[in-house]
Image: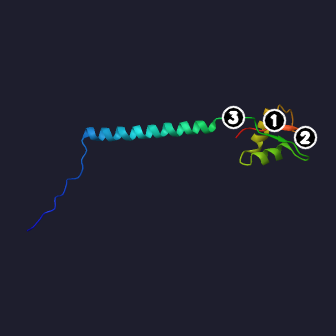
């Protein structure tokens, strides 16, 4: 007795089927983008609570404080932000002075 294997024809989508699949993928990518944007915006929000601060030690400079407290940031930008936050006119800091630091 000879049996022949039944082969299904390959799957073919109609024009409506292609539109449904395309709409599904567009919807999924939109949902994923919205989720990623929502999580990224929450990560950018400033942390609640008191601002971080540092007490100036002998021989500290704004540059040394900026590079020590924010090693991955551009030191020029960090120094400028520390000056702005603390209303400093110049670059002089004194031992014992408390400086607020930028968040993040």
Residue 83: mark: 1
Q: Local crowd at mark 3 within 10 Å, few (<14), some, or many (≥20)?
A: few
Mark 2 residue element: loop
- Of labels 3 and 2, the one closer to you: 3
Question: Which part of the image, by quadrant, shows the C terminus?
Answer: top right
Q: Is residue 21 left or right of residue 90?
A: left
Identified at 89% across, 45% down, the residue is: 57
**Dot 2 alpha-carbon crowd within 10 angstroms: few under 14, some 14 to 19, many 20 or more:** few
How far apart marks 1 and 2 lie (CA) works out to: 17 Å
Mark 1 and mark 2 lie on one chain; the one further toward the N terminus is 1
The x, y position of residue 93, in whole percent, is 89, 39
Quickly name the residue at label 3: 48
Residue count near mark 1 (Cα–Cα under 10 Å), binned few <14, some 14–19, many ≥20: some
Q: How is the image coloured?
A: rainbow
**Label whose residue precedes the other's in the sequence (1 or 3):** 3
In the depicted structure, whether residue 66 falls above or below residue 45: below
The residue sitting at 63% across, 37% down in the picture is 44
In this view, which residue lies farthest toward the bottom? Answer: 1
Rounded to the nearest angstrom, the CA distance separating label 1 from label 3 is 22 Å
Q: Residue at x 49, y 39 (%)?
A: 33
Q: Quadrant of residue 79?
A: top right
Residue at position x 83%, y 31% from top?
A: 87
Q: Is residue 89 above or below residue 72?
A: above
Q: CA distance from mark 3 to mark 2?
A: 26 Å
Q: Are marks 1 and 3 in contact (CB under 8 Å)?
A: no
Rendering coords of residue 36 (x, y %): 52, 40
Where disc 3 sits, the SS reads loop
- Locate residue 56, reporting x and y percent: 87, 42
Circle 2 residue: 96
Q: Which numbered disc flags the more N-terminal residue, 3 or 2?
A: 3
Q: Quadrant of residue 77?
A: top right
Tag of residue 44: none
């Amino acid at each position: 007795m000879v049996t022949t294997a039944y082969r299904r024809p390959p799957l073919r989508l109609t024009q409506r089927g292609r539109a449904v699949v395309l709409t599904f993928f567009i919807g999924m990518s939109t949902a994923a983008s919205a989720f990623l944007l929502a999580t990224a915006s929450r990560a950018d929000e400033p942390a609640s609570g008191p601002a971080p601060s540092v007490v100036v030690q002998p021989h500290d400079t704004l540059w040394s404080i900026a590079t020590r407290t924010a090693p991955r940031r551009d030191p020029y930008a960090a120094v400028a932000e520390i000056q702005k936050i603390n209303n400093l006119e110049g670059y002089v800091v004194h031992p014992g002075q408390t400086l607020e630091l930028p968040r993040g």
